[in-house]
Amino acid sequence: MSNKQGKRYSEEFKRDAVALARSSGKTVTEVARDLGVSPEGLRSWVKQDKADRGEGGPGDLTSAEHEELRRLRRQNLEQQKTIEVLKKATAFFARESDR
């Protein structure tokens, strides 16, 4: 199941799961099995938590940086759509002025 179509977990659940993974002495896979979540998902949450704590590797983005990137991508998409509309309008009015 892909992340976008999979189960959505609350931020509180994710925080608690990460805390359990960090403090239990169990492997991420064991904790994930105990919680009924995918090991890949829990690993991702743990990695994101490390980045948010400033312990991530080079290039790891914090949650705030991820959100800013999503916002900028949405804004970029809207601007691209606006540019396309303006191009079409410019072409339309250029044809109209040639008549």
Image (cartoon, rainbow, N blue to C red):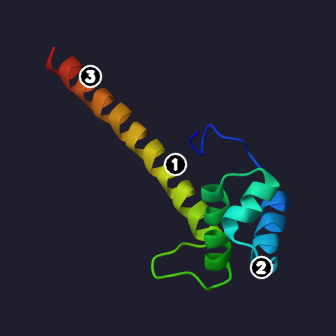
Coordinates of residue 14 in the picture (x, y in percent): 78, 61
Q: Is residue 55 left or right of residue 91?
A: right
| Tag 3 secondary structure | helix
Coordinates of residue 20 in the picture (x, y in percent): 82, 71
Q: Is disc 1 surrounded by few (<14), some (14 to 19) or many (20+) residues within 10 Å?
A: few
Tag 2 or tag 3, which sits nearer the N-term?
2
- Vertical side of 91 occupied by 6: above or below: below
Amino acid beneath label 1: Arg
Query: What residue is disc 2 on?
Result: 25
Coordinates of residue 66 in the picture (x, y in percent): 57, 64
Using the rendered view, name the quadrant where residue 71 is placed: bottom right
The residue depicted at 42 percent of the width and 39 percent of the height is 82
Q: Which circle marks residue 74 in the picture?
A: 1
Callouts 3 and 2 close, C-beta under 8 Å: no
The residue depicted at 44 percent of the width and 44 percent of the height is 77
The residue depicted at 38 percent of the width and 43 percent of the height is 80
Query: What residue is disc 3 on?
Result: 92
| Tag 1 secondary structure | helix
Is 51 in front, or is 1?
A: 1
Is 71 in front, or is 8?
A: 8
| Tag 2 secondary structure | loop
Using the rendered view, name the quadrant where residue 91 is placed: top left
Q: Which circle marks residue 86 in the picture?
A: none
Amino acid beneath label 2: Gly
- Vertical side of 30 occupied by 38: above or below: above
Mark 1 or 3: the one toward you: 1
- Vertical side of 94 occupied by 77: above or below: below
Mark 1 or 2: the one toward you: 2
- Vertical side of 83 occupied by 40: above or below: below
